[in-house]
Image (cartoon, rainbow, N blue to C red):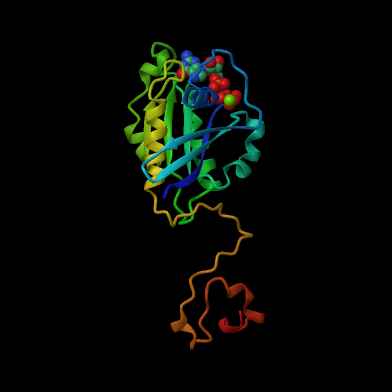
Amino acid sequence: MQQERLLKVLVIGDLGVGKTSIIKRYVNQVFSQHYRATIGVDFALKVLNWDHQTVIRLQLWDIAGQERYGNMTRVYYREAVGALVVFDMTRATTFQAVLKWKKDLDSKVALGNGRPLPAVLLANKCDQQRHGLCSKLPKLDNFSRDHGFVGWYETSAKDNTNIDAAIMCLVENVMAIDTEAVPVESDPSVLILPAFDYNLKERSDSRCSVCTTFQSSRKPHSEL
Ligand SMILES: Nc1nc2c(ncn2[C@@H]2O[C@H](COP(=O)(O)OP(=O)(O)OP(=O)(O)O)[C@@H](O)[C@H]2O)c(=O)[nH]1
Ligand SMILES: [Mg+2]
């Protein structure tokens, strides 16, 4: 029987680095030189026949790079399972912002097992090799490994270079993660109960980590 999986993937990075263009290239096979800043967030869907048993509904969240939407990212990131972090090879400031975006991501969302979301780094606009800092950019192998990216690619939404490869790399990493690792945002208002160990029933004084704040009115587990 076929199963369907919905994967929410974030596309983040500074203003004008090409996030919308990458998504449009990937989903609609089009590119436009015309720049219109994304307002807040936009969405796109791509259906992938992953294998004989699995259809993936890849939901791409195109997050605006403009600073003014920064305080919304916690909401946008919720329940995401992976991210593309994009910078513009022709603008050094957008590369410097990569770590800011990665930090924002890791501080606001994690997988169910607490691990960071798999993220792939995209050095976009590689068709502009002769402009800006492109030629000065070191190979990003060490950088991406040191900062917890699962991989990195030079991409061009304009020339359709490595867009598919980068997204496939991300999806493969997401799919490789244990299916038990249901993504949840680390929300302090959500109480996650540990598995109950019946062998501990006799030890009425033993403290379970989630109960310590309720010590005064604590009931035995059997009454919960
Ligand atoms: N040469 C070249 N231009 C690109 C490429 N990708 C995007 N652009 C151009 O860069 C500009 C910005 O692209 P967008 O995709 O709108 O950038 P964005 O990251 O979505 O920007 P915000 O929505 O403001 O965060 C547009 O003029 C695009 O045509 C690329 O690979 N090569
Ligand atoms: Mg955009």
Left or right of 218: which side holds 49?
left
Where is the C terminus found, in terms of image quarters? bottom right
Q: Where is residue 2 in the image (x, y as percent from the top left)?
A: 43, 47
Q: Position of residue 105 (x, y in %)?
A: 52, 42
State which quadrant residue 35 falls in: top right
Q: How many labels does the image show?
A: 0
Residue depicted at 38% across the width and 25% down the height: 162
Residue depicted at 60% across the width and 30% down the height: 64
Q: Does the rendering let one see residue 16? A: no
Q: Where is residue 83 in the image (x, y as percent from the top left)?
A: 48, 38
Q: Position of residue 75 (x, y in %)?
A: 63, 44
Q: Does the rendering let one see residue 178? A: yes
Relative to 175, say whether 42 is above or below. above
Q: Residue furthest top?
A: 130
Residue depicted at 46% across the width and 45% down the height: 117
State which quadrant residue 178 falls in: bottom left
Left or right of 98: which side holds 168?
left
Q: 103 or 222: nearer the eye?
A: 222
Q: Where ligand 2 lies, by quadrant? A: top right
Q: 21 or 152: nearer the eye?
A: 21
Q: Residue furthest front?
A: 1
Q: Residue furthest bottom?
A: 202
Relative to 56, say whether 164 is above or below. above
Q: 179 or 106: nearer the eye?
A: 179
